Image (cartoon, grey):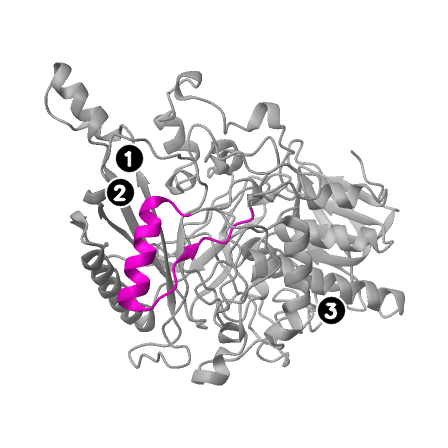
Amino acid sequence: MTISRTTVYDALIVGSGASGGWVAKELAEAGMNVLMMEAGPPRIPARDFTEHTWPYQVRYRGFGDQRKLLTEQPVQRLCYACDEYSHQFFVNDSEHPYTFPPDKPFLWIRGRQVGGKTFCWARESYRYSDYEFKAAERDGYEQSWPFSYRELEPYYDRVESFIGVSASKEGLPQMPDGKFLPPMNLSCGELTAKEVIERQFGWRVMPDRVANLTVPHNGRPACHYCDECQRGCHTASYFNSPSVTLPAAARTGRFTLLSDSVVSHVVMNREGCAEGVHYIDRVTKAHKEARAKIIVLAAATLESTRILLNSRSPRFPNGVGNSHGILGHYLMDHFTVEGANGELASLASSTREPVGNPCGYLIPKYSNIDGHSNSQFLRGYRFDGTATQQLYDQAFSLPGYGQKWRESVRNEIPYSFSIEAQGECLPRFDNFVELDADKKDAWGIPVLRIHASYGENEQAMAKAMRQDIGDILDAMKVRNPQAPSEQLSIFGKNIHECGTARMGTNAKNSVLNAYNQVHEVKNLFVTDGACFVTQGCYEPTLTIMALSVRAADYIVDSYRKGEL
């Protein structure tokens, strides 16, 4: 599709994932003409979705072409969801390089396609509370968000009501309840864990909160529990933008989607306003421009920041939004303590438990909330995991042969219990990204050089996380316990990167105002995770969507008043 250089849209959105989809829906439904630009191609379910594909139906039986993965996706393959079934949802690393210091490794997992990473996200959908939004007011570290939970609450309501989030209501201040569909059931092992952990530690154990439908919702059928969500979903029973928000935008007749369009920078005029974007056709490499009255960057945290840094002009020599040197700084990503597991001997059985549940259990944050302070570190962490039958996996390592061996396989199906902890990364100025002056991607755009590592606070928190996990394994009386890893996850591995263009009330220490608007440029907005001030220990996607709706409301109101 060709966009005329003379056409001026009301709004132009870069990125089609969780954030961009919501902004497009809200603006188009409010009467604005919207152009969305996506760097990658559209996905075709009949070709690209593989949630019902069996190992014998793929060439390498699910293990993938290792030589090709090592040459084309050496970074992406390290994500649990990138394999022979779903590698198409991840970028080719040879086309999308980035750099980092040798002593500060970083995993940048990316999905460039219509829908972004919403095809293969873990769907965990948690609200933040004032333990996150007002954390600095509690412990004095860095700064708080420029609004409270109460101000974002109605936007959480709108998002959950539209996309469908299955969860149980628990009444916990550190994890606010929402507009939920019925929760998924805990397995027998998870119910056992709930009974033991709640009795012994006083911590709530609940079904995970996920954007999977447990009942039909807004024209989409309920989840059918195939438990391969990272491979796509033919029935659209979990949230992804091409199945939920983008169709809503398209139904207005005021939405135009331009895929395979790699945006390099925002085009600024002499007055210091954004007037469009410069982009490159992904296939032909032709350079083009698109114009709009309002520009919204929703390309994911690091991509949006990269575009801002690359948007240099005489007025903004260091990039748009960077007059005070804050842009690119305060990068955060959750860290995890993983690998802890064991067997629940009492549940070993020859009876097969129904399988396929796409979520496990969750234990919310209890450290450094009212009545539970820890002087060893700031902020906190939460737990999640699963308890499931291994079915017949044990047959691969079970000694023996013949009838007796077959009976052992059938009659002694082990029941496994696993747990991990995820902790909050503090925002630090020395965790930052910058443009690499010496390296460019396949389209000639400067790549990012990423400087990020975990600090003393994260290490101290990890020590407490390991201790708690060990105590839980002891309380569960698991057989063959495996202790958690002593190593923290590599920065970026959890794919929850946030910050680098944070919100605030002061342009000297933030890039955006309380409505995701660049302080220096009134018609330029950033609505993805780049805007985060703190990260909490909970997944950011639901908050990104709520912030996007809030920013869209502000854009619509300001546009109607003639202020944009």
Residue at screen point 40% across, 42% down: 79
Question: Which quarter of the rendering shows the N terminus?
Answer: top right
Q: CA distance from mark 3 to mark 2?
A: 54 Å
Q: Which residue is mark 1?
A: 390
Residue 247 vs 87, above or below: the answer is below
Q: Position of residue 497 (x, y in %)?
A: 48, 58
Q: Is residue 414 visible?
A: yes
Is 222 rendered above or below residue 182? above
Region of the chain picked out in magenta, as a range:
186-211
The residue type indicated by label 1 comes to Gln
Write down the quadrant of residue 218 in the picture.
top right
283 or 340: nearer the eye? 340
| In-image side of 466 versus 47 (left or right) | left
Please tell me the numbered disc located at residue 416. Answer: 2
In this view, which residue lies farthest toward the left?
400
Whether pointer 1 and pointer 2 mark residues with C-beta atoms closer than 8 Å, the reply is yes
Q: Residue 436: x and y, percent?
A: 49, 55
Q: Residues within 10 Å of mark 1 (few under 14, many from 20)?
A: some
Name the secondary structure under disc 1: loop
Q: Quadrant of the C terminus?
A: bottom right
Q: Is residue 363 left or right of residue 142?
A: left
Label 1 to label 3: alpha-carbon separation:
55 Å
Q: Indicate which label's residue lies in the foreground, 3 or 2.
A: 2
The first of marks 1 and 2 along the sequence is 1
Taking the image as shown, residue 429 lies to the left or right of residue 339, namely: right
Which residue carries the number 3 mark? 521
Query: Residue 82, image x and y in percent?
Result: 43, 36
The residue under the point 87% across, 53% down is 31
Amino acid at pointer 2: Ser
Quarter of image, res 200: bottom left
